[in-house]
Structure formats: structure tokens, C-alpha cells
Image (cartoon, rainbow, N blue to C red):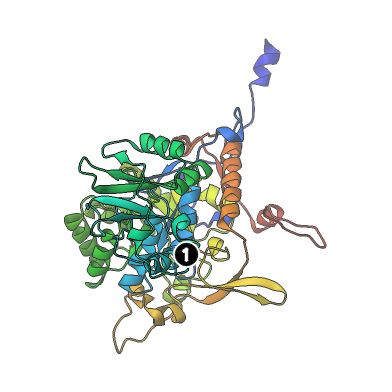
Amino acid sequence: MAGKEKVNIHFGGDGYSSEELFSKFSKGTAHTYDDVICLPGHINFSVDEVSLQTKLTRNISLKLPFVSSPMDTVTESDMAINMALQGGIGIIHYNNTIEEQAAEVRTVKRYKNGFITDPIVLSPNHTIADVDQIKERNGFSGIPITIDGTMGSRLVGFVSNRDVDFLEDRSRKLSEVMTTDLVVAQEGCTLSEANLILRESKKGKLPIVNDNYELISLISRNDMKKNRDFPLASKDSKNKQLLAGAAIGTRPKDKDRLKALVAQGVDVIVIDSSQGDSEYQYDMINHIKREYPGLDVIGGNVVTSSQVLHLIQVGVDGIRVGMGVGSICTTQEVCAVGRAQASAVYHTARTAALHGVPIIADGGISSSGHIVKALTLGASAVMMGSMLAGTEESPGQYFFQDGVRLKKYRGMGSIEAMTKGSSKRYFAEGKNTIKVAQGVSGAVVDKGSVGRFLPYLKQGVSHGLQDLGVKNLIELHDKLYKGDIRFELRTHAAQREGSVHSLHTYEKRLF
């Protein structure tokens, strides 16, 4: 018996709770991700049992806590599509015209559909040349034909590649070549029922019609395959389309931008500002909630608990946290305002959690370990810029320098980006306004495709949660605020010891 009692005795020293580390012992000192290390917990489950499902906003859930930043060298439609397919979401930048940004959102929403409610439709009087133009512009040629070429009109045929591929006269009318023996589904059928008809018919697309044989919607075989290949894909609940986010500013003209984005089906709006606790942002949030009450809004950027409370009181559904911590951001250097990111995430998340509002840790992420730390400190998701800027899906072209394949990456506060239009993010618009750069331009190393990079990050974060002894983010945050997740601060020597060291040469491969 005495032996068993001794086995149950240990001398402690198992680190500190988050409250002890960030509130009691560190008053007046701010910490970055690298300053902090999480202590391991007890493992009684496999890494495959770890779930990274999370909340982006009060009303939007994601299978992965990954968000691509609204920067013009990071997120356009290609990035947003691939982020959503993998289980995250992309926020399309607004350093472009209203029409250009709206077109990017439209591309994402049309990429993977359940019921396609606004398909391209032609009439029997259109020609094969019209089909060619649609294929060149949109990448597909399976088109329903209605009497007057619009939705809601009587369906009379269908045109696909098989109907027009080998015809030399491209001026022939579609009435001469379209297929009229059609397989259709009736309005009111479920997506599962429609997919079953599509699968059994072996057709590429299935028109949905009402009792008058008028075209109501369409479903696609390609979308069935995408659903099979990307089980974690982020989709809206209504039409099963990919989720798409977009950024706007706080100027009066941004209300027109907002209207155009809503018309294309945007799922969430991010109000993009380097300092989000402003009357300008409050006015925009109030406008969005008044005009589009069903649209989720993410406010920010902020770094203090009081700023978080202000945005929650105005009505935001999510909050973006970070100021001056991105690899290309110089706000803290130029303006002497901001906060070290680990401290910012912990203190803001603690307040936001009281009100059920998720926070997104934005900036300072350069490894899967940083993602684990951000989530462990209370974030529900992380926003990445430089981590994704070198992927194939980011805007821009690769170039070689000293034998290394690179891609350009710039801060939205850089002179180059501000000249193109992002100066409104930094309250620096006006004909005679002197623009003060709060960012730089540079280059990042090629990271390959998001299709390979995000699964690597997912697995790394999953292993991190397993090592902490938690199966999901709900359990992680519950243990965080109970004090069960333990932390320590690292000296510079400890930080060196925790990374690759004592080697003459080495090669670091991510996957």
C-alpha cells in the first residue's frame, strides 16, 4: 500500500496555466508564439480521431481552421476555391475594381454547386459559335436550351461537346444540333435523389424542371466527383456551393462593392482595416446588419479586450486579431502601435469567448506549430498570408533567383499595394495625402500546391492536439480556460534548442 501511495506522488513543476502566464506573471510583457511552449498532456486516442472542425463566425463552420488572407498576392478565386475544397475558406482581396472582385466571388460560387440556380442558358436560335465562346470563357460547354434562352422558360433541348465537336460550320443554329431526348428531374426532388438520377442516366448534367417543363435549376456530374474527392469541402447549406469570403473597406464607395458581392452570393464579409476599432468600421457594420441581416461580418483588426468588446457590441459575428505581426508588416516599427501576437490572441479570445464570438488569429504564422499555439491560446481559426503566398494557387508568376524558385509577396501596407488602392485600409486616401508605408514587398519560396500543403498543415496540427491530449477544439478551449493546458516561457537558448541545431548542413522538407 505504501508503495502505491508513493507512485501517486510527484513534485509538480508542470508549467503554468494561461492565466498565470499571461496575466499574473507577465504583466507589462507581451509574448510571441516563439516565446511560448505548450506542455504535453496524456494520449489515449489516435491522431485519426482528432477533429479540427471549428467556427469561423457565429454561424459559419469549417472542417479546418485555415483562412487565406485578403491580400493581392495571396487570395483570388483560385486560392479561394482550393482553400474551400480542402475545408478552409479564402477571403478575396479588394485591391481591384468592384467588377473584378465580384467576378472572383462568382467564380468561386460557381465552381462546385449542388443545385445550380443560375446556369448559363441559350436559345435554339443561338449558334455553335456561341457555345464555343462560353467554353473558352468558362471552361464548359454543357448548356441547357430553353425557348427564349433564359431560366424559367420551357426546356427544349441540351447541347454538349458530343453534339458540336466535329461540326465544321460553327454558324449553325443550336436547334439543328441540340439533343431533345432529355433526362430530367422534377422540382422538389432532393439533391441526393437528383444525384441518383444523374448517376444512373450516365449524363453529364441533369436539368431540374417544374410541372410546365420550365427550367428551374441544374446539377452536374463533375460536382458529384468533387464531392467524393473533397469530403471536407466548405459549402453553404442552401445550394451546397463552396464558401467564399470577401474583404471590403469602410469608405462610402464600399457600400456599392458590398452590394455587388452580395449579388454574387458571398458568404462572409471581412472589414479590412489595420486598426479596426473605429467609428468608420462601426458605421459599416451597422449598414451591413441593417441592409443584409443574414450576412455574417468579421470585424478587425484588433489586439485588446476592450476593442473586442466594442466590435461585439456593434454586432460582428467574428473578429480578426493581429496588428503589426505579419512577416511583411511594419506597423509596429513605423507607428509604434500593436501587440505581440501570442498575448493578443489570448487576451482577445478570452473576452470574445464570453460572448460566443470566434476570433481569427491573423499574422505571425510561419509553421504548423504556430497554428497549434494560436488555437491553444483561444483562436478558432488562423489567417495565413506568407504561408500561402508561395503556393501555385496564389496570384502572380514564379521566378528564379540564385537558383531558388520564388513568388512575389507584398504587404497591403507597402507602397506598391497602396498605389494600387489599398491605402484606404490605412486611412491614407486623398489627393494630397502623403502615404506612409506600413509594409514591404519581397518574395517567398515555392511551396507547391495548396492541395498538398494544407493536408500537411492539417496533419501537423492534428499531431499537436494529440500531443496536448485533446481530440477537438471545443475540448482544447475548455481545458485552456480551466487551466488544464499548461505553458512555459522559453529563453532564447531554449528556442534554439527547440529548432534544428548542431548540424553542419541539413535539408528541411515539409512533405
* Spot occupied by residue 296 in the image (x, y as percentages of width and height): 29, 52
Above or below, 477 relative to 446: above
Q: Nearer the viewer, residue 273 or 151?
A: 151
Position in image of residue 210 (x %, y %): 23, 42
Under circle 1, the secondary element is: loop
- Give the percent coordinates (x, y) of residue 399: 63, 75
Residue at coordinates 28% horizontally, 60% vertically from top-left?
123
- Residue 427 is drawn in which quadrant? bottom left
Q: Quadrant of residue 453?
A: bottom right
Q: Looking at the picture, tell me which residue is in the foreground, 292 or 470.
A: 292
Q: Where, quadrant-wise, is the N terminus in this rendering?
A: top right
Nearer to us in this view, 410 or 116: 116
Visible residue check, residue 378: no
Q: Residue furthest left?
A: 290
Left or right side of 59 for 6: right
In the displayed orientation, state which residue is furthest to the right: 504
* Amino acid type, mark 1: Leu
- 511 relative to 98 in the view: left or right: right
* Left or right, residue 103 beside residue 81: left
Q: What is the residue that sits farthest to the top in this orientation?
A: 1
The answer to whether one can see residue 249 in this image is yes
Which residue corresponds to the image point at 64% horizontal and 28% vertical from the top-left?
10
> How many labels were placed on the picture?
1
- Mark 1 crowd level (few <14, some 14–19, many ≥20, 10 Å Cα): few
Q: Nearer the viewer, residue 104 or 292?
A: 104
State the image coordinates of residue 238 (x, y, percent, origin top left): 31, 44
- Residue furthest to the bottom in view is 432
Mark 1 = which residue?
A: 167
